[in-house]
Every structure is written in structure tokens, then in C-alpha cells.
């Protein structure tokens, strides 16, 4: 798909079919995340691939809506602050690095006809416990990965005039 078509067609999918995702497709979307840029090229993240079958109840402790576990796969992106680049004033860039990697993954999924939904409103304590995350690893985002059972609706976005300034604030 052309990039301009792809960014228009991607949307947050909140209903999934129970169809399997092939291993080839999974590897393709994971590789898109691998190719994402990151501060100082540190790639300070890990992608945890979780098969939902038989784990629905447990996984819904992380994020409650039923559609979270409808897809065959859920991916958790975690950041590792110690691996990341930190600017001289102390700003750590792992959130930015993970966001770019997730966006690459999400767009690659849409290109394959697969749906995703960035989930930030999850329970981090439940995520830590269920995924066995060490203390120095931060869960940043989840997304289901599967075939959509819903459809793209109208895109609600601010006009460019509300988002862009020229030359200065
Ligand atoms: C950082 C971030 C966190 C989000 N968290 C959630 C979430 O917890 N649950 C949810 O249903 N959607 C979540 N979303 C999806 C947004 O609601 C969605 O991207 C936005 O409404 C625009 O819709 P679209 O993705 O369909 O274009 C999140 C998106 C981002 C980028």
C-alpha cells in the first residue's frame, strides 16, 4: 500500500476476528519495529509476544475490555531505561523510542490487513506481575494483533491550523 493511503487507512481496531496471524506476518511486523530509528540507535526496548488463547481472563487483568483478548496475539512493548539514551539535562528518551517502534509495527500491521490498537490505559502492576517484568523494565504500550472485525470510521482530527505554527510560538 502507498504510504499516504496506509496512514489514512490505519485506525484503532476494537473488535477482532478469531483468525490466526501467520508466523510470517508476525515476523514482518516485528521487523518493522526493529527497523525504527531510536536515540543514539540504542533500541532500548523489548517486544513481548503473547498468545491470548487460554489466557483471556489473566490478560484482562492488564486491560479489561473484552476485545483486548479477541485477537490471537497481544504485543507488549517495554522500555529499559538503562539501555536508553538520556540527554544531558536528564531527559530519558525510552518513551519516544518505544513510540516510534510501536508506530512502525502498527503501520506494518495495517499494511498486512491486520488490526492493532495502542493501549496505554493498562494496569502496570498487573502487567509486571503477569509478564514477570524486572523492576528496571517499564511496560509502555500494549496492542492486540489480529484481523479486524470492525471498520474504519471517520477520522476525527484537529485541522492543521490548530497544530502548526511557523517560525516561532
Ligand atoms: C499513547 C496512546 C495511548 C492510547 N491508549 C488507548 C487505550 O488505552 N485504549 C484505547 O481504546 N485506545 C487507546 N489509544 C488509541 C487512541 O484512542 C486513538 O489512536 C485515537 O482516538 C485516534 O483514533 P485512531 O487510532 O482510530 O485514528 C491510545 C493511543 C495512543 C497513541
Image (tube, rainbow, N blue to C red):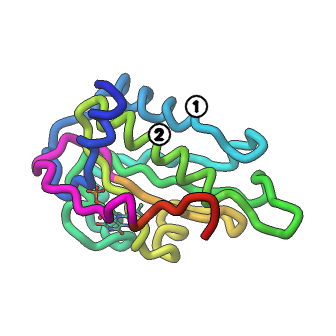
Q: Is residue 87 found inside the magenta-colored segment of the image?
A: no
Where residue 2 appears, x then y in whole percent?
32, 25
- At x 62%, y 51%, the residue is 97
Task: Give the extent of the magenta segment.
Answer: 144-161
Q: Above or below — where is 62 with respect to 87?
A: below
Chief secondary structure of the magenta span? Answer: loop
Residue 119: quadrant of the picture: bottom left
Does the beta carbon at disc 1 come under 8 Å from ligand 1? no
Q: Above or below — where is 36 with respect to 102?
A: above
Could you say which disc has been placed on residue 104 in the image? 2
Where residue 54 appears, x then y in whole percent?
26, 54
Between disc 1 and disc 2, whose residue precedes? Answer: 1
Q: Above or below — where is 110 with respect to 140?
A: above
- At x 69%, y 69%, the residue is 135
Q: In 3D space, how far apart are the residues under numbered discs 1 and 2 (Cα atoms)?
A: 8 Å
Where residue 53 appears, x then y in whole percent?
26, 49
Is 23 displayed left or right of 102 in the figure? left
Q: Quick one: 99 or 16, which is closer to the camera?
A: 99
Is 82 displayed left or right of 132 in the figure? right
- At x 48%, y 35%, the residue is 30
Q: Above or below — where is 159 with respect to 83?
A: below
Could you say which disc has been placed on residue 35 in the image? 1
Where residue 116 appears, x then y in whole percent?
31, 49
Q: Quick one: 151 or 6, which is closer to the camera?
A: 6
Q: Quick one: 137 or 84, which is closer to the camera?
A: 84
Q: Secondary structure at mark 2?
A: helix
Amino acid at each position: 500500500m502507498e504510504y499516504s493511503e496506509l496512514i489514512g487507512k490505519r485506525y484503532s481496531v476494537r473488535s477482532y476476528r478469531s483468525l490466526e496471524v501467520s508466523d510470517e506476518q508476525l515476523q514482518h511486523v516485528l521487523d518493522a519495529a526493529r527497523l525504527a530509528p531510536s536515540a543514539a540507535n540504542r533500541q532500548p526496548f523489548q517486544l513481548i509476544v503473547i498468545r491470548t488463547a487460554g489466557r483471556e481472563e489473566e490478560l484482562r487483568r492488564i486491560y479489561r475490555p473484552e476485545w483486548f483478548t479477541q485477537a490471537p496475539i497481544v504485543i507488549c512493548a517495554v522500555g529499559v531505561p538503562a539501555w536508553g539514551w538520556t540527554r544531558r539535562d536528564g531527559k530519558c528518551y525510552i518513551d519516544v523510542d518505544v513510540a516510534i517502534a510501536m508506530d512502525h509495527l502498527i503501520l506494518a500491521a495495517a499494511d498486512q490487513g491486520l488490526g492493532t490498537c495502542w493501549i496505554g490505559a493498562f494496569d502496570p502492576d498487573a502487567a509486571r506481575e503477569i509478564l514477570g517484568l524486572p523492576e528496571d523494565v517499564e511496560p509502555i504500550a500494549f496492542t492486540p494483533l489480529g484481523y479486524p472485525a470492525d471498520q474504519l470510521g471517520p477520522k476525527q482530527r484537529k485541522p492543521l491550523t490548530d497544530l502548526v505554527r511557523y517560525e516561532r510560538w
